[in-house]
Image (cartoon, rainbow, N blue to C red):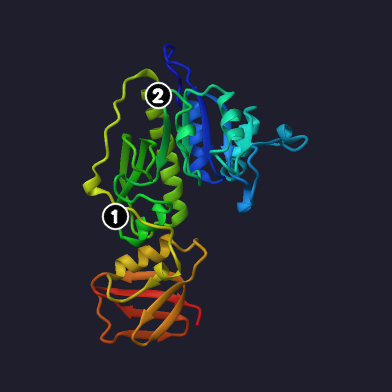
Amino acid sequence: MTTRPPDYPTARLIFCGMFGPLSRLPLAALLAAGFDVRAVVVPPRGGAEGGAAPRRLEPPAGYAARPVGLAAFLRQTVVELAWERGIPVVEVARPGARETLAALAAHAPDLLAVSCFPYRLPRALRALPRLGCLNLHPALLPANRGPAPLFWTFREGFTHTGVTAHLMDGGLDSGPIVAREGFDLPDGTTGDELELRCAALGGEVLAAAARGLADGTLTPRPQDEARATTYPWPCADDFAVTPDRPARWAFNFIRGTAGWGHPHRLVTPAGTFTVRAALAYDPDARLGAPLVRDGDEVRVQCAPGVLTVAVAD
């Protein structure tokens, strides 16, 4: 656990996130670093519509008596972590509403920290904390901006990725960078594995960046717009796999995005198949035929290499 040095300034902080590890682990890192987290802000669960007024979420009766083991911690959300620490949890559907601004201003935050929050923050909210709004993005900005960087890490075949902490401005992931850390992406990495690695490393980076902003030791630097790339939320067509790309890319893409809720379609001259799983790839193999099928196992010649998948039809 990170310990706070005796002269570390205690900054008041509001954390904005969602319900997965990309919010929970960064919040845990900020708490471990000694930040005074005044409130945790989340969107309505399940995409439900909400009114202009923020709503405080209260724990169920007896919640504090629940045991907290490793398995429970891995399933924990920012809401449950906040409840255990006695931090108010506020459900917000309209970040720019007067009621929201008033409720958050009452906490007198020095900094807003954001990780995996689904809303763009309006100017009035970004102006609320004196140190600004710090966002954690699970990619190496200025590349791979947008709402689904983990998907596009696999779709674009990146073999090196990482996390970035940056100050928020009026653009999408375009504000000045405070800190970045990268790592290599091994073959066969799943989406869950990448998310957890970004969440764990991102928590460390976000806490260090927040500390540097609080004590004045970090200087944000503008992003290089000439190197910026931005990707949208993926659509069904983005899950298609064609053999004109390398077998290694196809294997890693299918493995990495298997949990996104869209089936992968293997589109070949011999037909289109719904993929159940990516089984293997050989980067140098040649089939001697475009495709070989044995039951539900299909091997397809790619450019280059051979991809082996299990298919549903």
Q: Residue at x 31, y 35 (%)?
A: 176
Kind of residue at disc 1 = Thr
Classed neighbour count for the residue bearing mark 1: other residues with Cα under 10 Å, few (<14), some (14–19), many (≥20):
some
Can you say whether 149 is above or below 202 in the image? below
Instruction: Name, please, the residue furthest toward the top.
Output: 7
Residue 85 falls left or right of residue 252:
right
The number of callouts visible is 2
Q: Residue at x 57, y 38 (%)?
A: 97
Instruction: Name, please, the residue furthest toward the front.
Output: 98
Kind of residue at disc 2 = Arg
Can you say whether 230 is above or below 24 in the image? below
Residue 194 in the image: state x and y as whole percent: 42, 51
Q: Is residue 35 visible?
A: no
Which one is in front, 273 or 121?
121
Element marked by disc 1: loop
Can you say whether 130 is above or below 78 in the image? above
Q: Which mark is residue 262?
A: none
Q: CA distance from mark 1 to mark 2?
A: 30 Å
Closer to viewer: mark 1 or mark 2: 2
Classed neighbour count for the residue bearing mark 2: other residues with Cα under 10 Å, few (<14), some (14–19), many (≥20):
many
Residue 121 falls left or right of residue 94:
left
Residue behind mark 2: 211
Can you say whether 233 is above or below 76 in the image? below
Q: Residue at x 42, y 54 (%)?
A: 148
Residue 279 in which image quadrant:
bottom left
Residue 264 in which image quadrant:
bottom left
Element marked by disc 2: helix
Residue 34 in the image: state x and y as whole percent: 49, 22
Of callouts 1 and 2, which one flags the residue occurring earlier in the amino acid sequence? 1
Q: Is residue 177 visible?
A: yes
Residue 304 in the image: state x and y as whole percent: 24, 73
Residue behind mark 1: 159
